[in-house]
Amino acid sequence: MGISQTDVADRAGVDPGFVQRLIDTGVLASATGGDFSEGDVRRVRLYQGLEGTGLPLEAIREALDVGELSFGWLDNPLYSLIAPLSPRSFREVASETGIPPDLLLVVREAIGFALPDPDDPMREDELRVVPLIRVLVSRGFPTAVVEQCLRVYGDSFRRIAETEAEWWRTQVTLPSMASGLSQAEMHEATIGFGVELAPLIQEALLAIYHAHQEHTWSEDLIEEVEVALDRTGLRKRLIRTPAICFLDISGYTRLTEERGDEAAAELATRLTPLVQRQADRHGGKVVKWLGDGVMLHFRRAEDAVPAALDLLDAVADAGLPPAHVGIQTGPVVFEGGDYFGRTVNLAARIAEHALAGQILVSDEVVGTIDRERFSITDVGAVPLKGVADPVNLHAVERRS
């Protein structure tokens, strides 16, 4: 059963006059009997975006007429994930659920759109997030905690979606176009592959997410057991001081200037698996990538130095520009999937002072190093940017 022209405008979030203009221009046509489809809702939203970028509807119609463009693929059920607008506004849903209106507005920001007005209609996919928020709020979760959760979810999935879109463009779209297919023919030829991949990607993402949950839950459980044993006096709790490690690629800026952004991106692509493998091997985890390097967290400070040395070797063996590392140990604050505090800042400053192929650490890290395996050379008190007093630094190497 089709939907009316008015419903198309409502579900696409446009003025009814815009839909009529699309019909008059010839880029939108109703089915027999005057009804429209959900694919038409998607087309209307697409046309609105295209016109918003300055592309005239008349030129789009001409490209459609000659067969250079086609948006028939938007009728495929695969694109039902492009959610239409619901008839309920943010203000109405907030009133119905008891969720603070400002918190509901964050949902749209988290999925990558501009902050809406409370009287704007919610998207159908946004409504599916509401039950989770409602439960968390009803259990007394502070609004700031729920908002942080939404933003971390949104940012993480944004990176996934952008990476996915890029490999689809480079590995599917561009090769198809290079073979001589028009845009319309390319979409027709590749839609089957997209339909095949979509459920497989969703299944893979869910499996990886569950594996990360298991890893994180296990770490938390170990911590709980240690606390319980310490509280009951059954064993002295093992105090573990975490460490933060910054690894930077020497000459990254010069490389970008000399060889361009593509060379820098290729370097990052090659560096990523090397860092991830060594972090996993030594019980660390990658916190974030920083363009010219990476920040890592180790639950045990004594694992940071061996990991850093193996990282330097792996980078060199891969033929990449030499790296340099700074390490500091001490308390950190975990928030929003990231770590903060003086320990983090000092580790970053130490890394800035390290030379190519060098690992520099503070006095605090020296106390965690196995001196039978590693040699330590005093560098002396060094003034670091943003640090009030000079910091004693030491270079660490393997013993031959």
Image (tube, grey):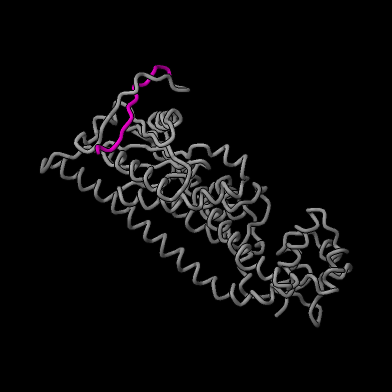
- Tell me residue 39's x, y (percent): 71, 72
Majority secondary structure in the magenta region: strand
Direction from residue 125 to residue 10 in the image, left or right: right
Q: Which residue extends farthest front? A: 400
Q: Nearer the viewer, residue 140 or 81?
A: 81
Direction from residue 214 to residue 258 in the image, left or right: right
Q: Which residue extends farthest bottom? A: 32
Quarter containing the N terminus: bottom right
The picture quadrant where one finds residue 215 is bottom left
Is 391 one of the magenta-colored residues?
Answer: yes
Q: Magenta region: which residues?
A: 388-400
Quarter containing the C terminus: top left
Going 24% across and 47% down the picture, which residue do you hit? 224
- Tell me residue 71's x, y (percent): 74, 71
Going 61% across and 45% down the picture, which residue do you hit? 259
The picture quadrant where one finds residue 29 is bottom right
Q: Nearer the viewer, residue 334 or 134?
A: 334
- Tell me residue 48's x, y (percent): 77, 59
- Tell me residue 187's x, y (percent): 69, 72
Is 62 one of the magenta-colored residues?
Answer: no
Going 62% across and 54% down the picture, which residue do you hit? 92
The picture quadrant where one finds residue 392 is top left
Asked if one can make out residue 137 in the rendered structure from this viewpoint, the answer is: no
Q: Say above or below: 350 vs 307.
A: above
Going 61% across and 77% down the picture, which residue do you hit? 192
Asked if one can make out residue 239 in the rendered structure from this viewpoint, the answer is: yes
Q: Nearer the viewer, residue 59 or 370?
A: 370
Q: Say above or below: 286 vs 215.
A: above
Report the label total: 0
Direction from residue 15 to residue 112 in the image, left or right: left
Q: Which residue extends farthest left? A: 234
